[in-house]
Amino acid sequence: MSSAVVGIRLAGPSDFVLAATIEAAADELLIEYLQATQWPPVDEPEARMAQPGFMLIAEDEASTAGIGFAHVLEVDGYAHLEQLAVLPQHGRQGHGRKLVHAAAAHAAARRYSEITLRTYVDVPWNAPFYETCGFRRSEPTSPFHKRLVDVESRLGLERYGARIQMTLQL
C-alpha cells in the first residue's frame, strides 16, 4: 500500500486514457461487492473527453503516476460529480476524499453553488462515504438530473441496489 504524497491537477488530453484504466480497476471492486453479473463498460476516453466539464487527476507527486480521478459534468447550469475512482491499491488512504474536496472547490471557483452526484445507498464507499464529505440526499427535480435517473434505469443499475442523488452545497 502506498502512503505517497498526492497532488491534484486538472487533466490533460492524455489523462482520459488513464482515467479509463483507473475506472476499470475501481469498478472491479464494485462489481465484486455487488456480485454484479452485468456491468456497463467504462466510458471510452474520447467520449469522456467530449463531455462538458472538467476532470481532476490525483497523482503520486514523486513518480507523477496517476492514481485516481474525479470527473465533473457541467450541464444545464449544474455541476455533477459523474465519476470518482481511485486505483484499489491506493484506496482507503484519503485520496478519494481529497479528489472530492478538490472537485467541489473547483466547481465553486467556477461559480456553482452546489455539486450533485448519483450513487448506491448501501455501498460503504458510496453514499456513506459521500455523507462524510458533506453531501446530503436530494431529489432529482431538474430535467438534467431526471435524465441521469433514466440513464441508470436503462443500464439496469438498480438491480444491484437502491440509488440516490446527493448534493453538496458549496
Image: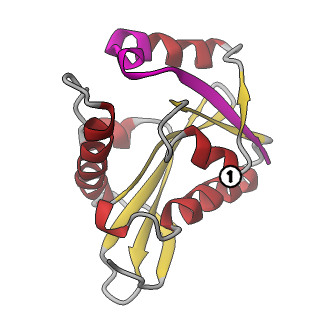
What residue span does the magenta drawing correspond to? 152-170
Give the x, y percent position of residue 10: 49, 63
Q: Which residue is at the far left?
A: 37
Give the x, y percent position of residue 27: 29, 43
Residue at 22% in and 32% down: 41
Give the x, y percent position of residue 4: 41, 85
Q: Identify whether 67 is placed above or below 137.
A: below
Residue occupied by mark 1? 132
Q: Is residue 132 left or right of residue 86?
A: right
Q: Which residue is at the far bottom?
A: 62
Q: Secondary structure at mark 1?
A: helix
Q: Is residue 161 magenta?
A: yes
Residue at 27% in and 60% down: 14
Residue 80 is drawn in which quadrant?
Answer: top right
Q: Residues within 10 Å of mark 1 (few under 14, many from 20)?
A: few
Q: Is residue 154 magenta?
A: yes
